[in-house]
Image: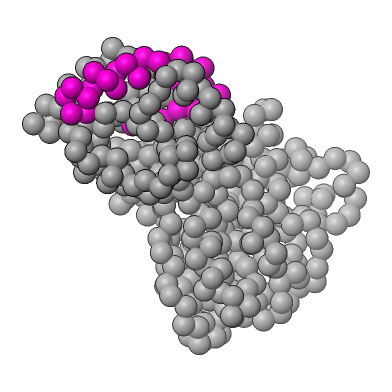
Amino acid sequence: MKRILCVLLAVLCLQSLCAFGGNSVASAEEVSEEAEQASMPPYEPLETKFGFRFEYPEEYQNLKGELAWWITSYNSTFGDATLFYVEVPEEEREAFREEAALAAKKTDGYMPEWAGQYKNTQLFSVKALFNDDDYLEYFENLTPAGYLNDFFSEELEGGGRTSVPVYQETVSLENNWKLVVQRNEPYTFEAEALPIDAFLGMLGEEYRAEAITLLENPETFTFGLKPEDWTLPGQVGSKISFESQTLQGDPVTSEELFSGCKVTMINVWATWCGPCISELPDLQGLDASFAEKDCQIIGVCLDATRDEAKQEALQLLEKSGVSYPNILVTPDMDWTAVMAIPTSYFVSEDGTILTEPVVGAHISKYKTVLNEALALVG
């Protein structure tokens, strides 16, 4: 239960606790008519690293406000994707949409400052669960009263209102992920439901009606879930491509790194991972033997995006005598959302994943899998 409370507490931070008045509801036809005046470029489909894909239906393409996802990955088997409706001035919308698309690929667990400066309201959230029946049962049976009881102390009871995630449906994906869809609804602290427009007062009046229409048509949202054509990043046959930097700050691309090598082993590690650190000297020796077969090793340090962790990583590499390239993780590296670390991929010169990844520190197994990968590329 403690684990559940910690996760839900983070989700709670997504939601406003202010009380405002309501507004009349606009019809879908009125919203659509106003939306026709917009001329923004279309939203690109969103894919996250924990089994979630969202394609914006036609009704979402030309809104008066902007849509922004807040992506939070608590671990490799649980993630949260929350959709916000944001009031953005016309002259800032294009820049906002570009920033929002970039931020949605990250999983840093907090709302970027550039988004928080605008008035917004939460529409829906999706909990992504990988083979976790306990969590699934919890979310599917969580009532507004149970949610409020878990997270609000007695001092907060007796007045006011808050935003509560209400279970809507569960979508099962073929890759063993399940998506729990929740609609955001206003409630008092005594678990009494409020009119849906009672929590949108922070939005301007001209935006409020559109947000209400989206909230009152949840089928529009669920229409955007496309499990049938989504594959989990990192599967055999998919390609790895990226632009990044070495830990020393030099720009590098996957094309440059993979070029000239029959097979590249990509070792995903972190400075807090004991087995990862322990195998570094052995990996250096393995890289030397790989070179005889026109193969190589590169490292991807998951936590080196923080300056402190980067310095620690550089010290660990120097101490272990590692000379093969180590690079920073970037938002487009979906395949780094692994179940455990270290995890190592074996890819061809064009970045195609050749074999199932090796999970864990297994020097002897690396050699075996490398030979399997070499046999595949000929």
Against 342, is 233 above or below? below
Against 154, is 376 above or below? above
Residue 374 in sight here = yes
Q: Quarter-wise, where is residue 151 in the image?
A: top right
Q: Is residue 87 left or right of residue 370?
A: right
Residue 336, percent from left and from top: 41, 37
What's the magenta region? 266-295
Residue 33, percent from left and from top: 51, 86
Nearer the observer, 125 or 171: 125
Query: At 60% from the left edge and 66% from the top edge, which residue is drawn?
Result: 85
Nearer the observer, 2 or 166: 2
Q: Quadrant of the C terminus?
A: top left
In the orientation shown, which residue stands out farthest toward the top?
364
Query: At 48% from the left edge and 51% from the top edge, which residue is drawn?
Result: 105
Residue 53, percent from left and from top: 41, 52
Query: At 74% from the left edge and 65% from the top edge, which residue is drawn?
Result: 199
Q: Is residue 22 left or right of residue 166?
A: right
